Amino acid sequence: WRQSERMRVQAPRQTTMRTVAMAGALRALERDAGHLASTSSSSSSSSSRRREVPCVLMDRSDRALPYEVVWEEQKRLVESKCRELDRADRCARQDVLLVQHEPVYTLGAGSTTENLLFDEEDPPLPLYRTERGGEVTYHGPGQLVLYPILDLRSFEQDLHWYMRSLEEVALQVLLSFGVEGHRVEGMTGVWVGDAKVAALGVRGRRWVTYHGLAINVCCDLGPFEDIVPCGIQGRRVTSLAEVLAERGGAIVWGSEEELLKEAAARMADSFERVFGVDLHRQKG
C-alpha cells in the first residue's frame, strides 16, 4: 500500500451510549484521588516550569468526527509549521486538537495486517494506513483523542521524552478520577491492572509532532475484538467507565456524555500541567 492509501470501506456500525450508574459522592472521589496523588510518583514528571509558548487547544470533543477530516487537518498544520521553519528557528504557535472519531480502524506506517482478524478487503469499519508508529487500533465515539501539533524545539527535542509525557497526561487523567494507572516496561501506553486503557502512536517531521494519544473513556469495546490491539497478544482493553463500574465507582454520572465531558476537561488540564503551557481553549 501507499502510505496514505485508504482501504475499502464498509459503513460503520452505530454505537449506542449506555448509562453509567455509579454510587458514592464527589467528596469521596476527591479524597481518594488526593490520597493517590500524594503517594503516586506519576505526577512527578510534570513540567516544573511554565513555558512562554502560545498554545491553542481546538476542542471538538462534543461530537464524533470522520477520521480522514481530522487526519487531513493535522497534515495541514504540520505543513504550515514546516514552512514557517524555513524562515524561523522555531514555530511561533503550538496547536492541539481534542476530538472523538466516528468508528474506524487505523494502521501505523509499518503495521502488519496479521493483527486484523477480518478480511482486509471487506473490513467491518473504515480502515486507514497512516504515518504514525505502532500497530492497528480502533477509534470511536466515547474515546478521547489528543493530537498535539507541537514544535519540540520549544519543549524537548526528544521523542522518547515526548511519548512518556503523553503517557503522563493519561496517567494524570486517570488519577483525577481516583484510578491509578501504570506503564508496562517495553510497551507504550497506559494500563489499569492487565488491561490497556490508553494508546499512543506519533510521528515527527522536522521535530513537529502529529498523531497522538487516545484514552478509552466510555467507548464500545466490541470493535477491539476484531483486531489484536496494538499488536499485543493476550492483553485485554478496558475503559475508564468500565474500571469505575467494576470498582463500584465514587461518583454518580448521569450519563456517559457527562463523564466524557468531564474527562475532556481533565485531559486538557493534564496536558497543561505536563507540558508546562497555558492552553488558549477554543470550541470548533
Image (cartoon, grey):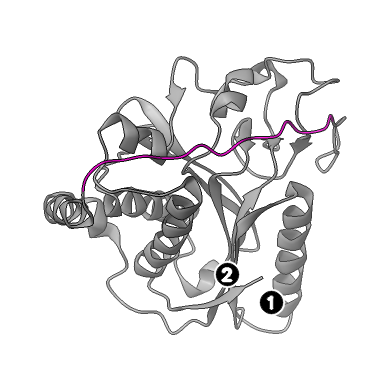
> Percent position (x, y) of residue 204?
62, 56
Residue 210 in view:
no
Residue in view at x 17 percent, y 57 percent: 27
Q: In the structure shown, which secondary structural element does the residue marked by tag 1 occupy?
A: helix
Q: Which mark is drawn over residue 151?
A: 2
Is residue 86 depicted above or below 244 in this figure? below
Q: Could you tell me which quadrant the C terminus lies in? A: bottom right
Query: Is 54 part of what is drawn in magenta?
Result: no
Residues 243 and 274: in front is 243
Residue in the picture at 43% in, 51% down: 259
The quarter of the picture where residue 104 lies is: top right
Three-letter code, disc 1 = Leu
Q: Main secondary structure of the magenta part?
A: loop
Q: Residue at x 25, y 34 (%)?
A: 248
Disc 2 on helix, strand or loop? loop
Question: Vertically, is 30 above or below 273?
Answer: above
- Please, is residue 57 above or below residue 201 in the view? below
Q: Is residue 39 left or right of residue 154?
A: left
What range is drawn magenta here? 10-24
N-term-proximal mark, 1 vs 2? 1
Residue that badge 1 annotates:
85
Q: Is residue 117 above or below residue 238?
A: above
Q: Residues within 10 Å of mark 2 (few under 14, many from 20)?
A: many
| Place of residue 61 in the rendered image (x, y in percent of width and height, measured from the top left) | 58, 58
| Tags 1 and 2 touching, CB below 8 Å | yes
**Residue at the image point whose x is 82% and y is 43% from the top:** 4
Residue type, numbered disc 2: Asp
Do we see residue 246 in this rendering? yes
Q: Nearer the viewer, residue 154 or 10?
A: 10
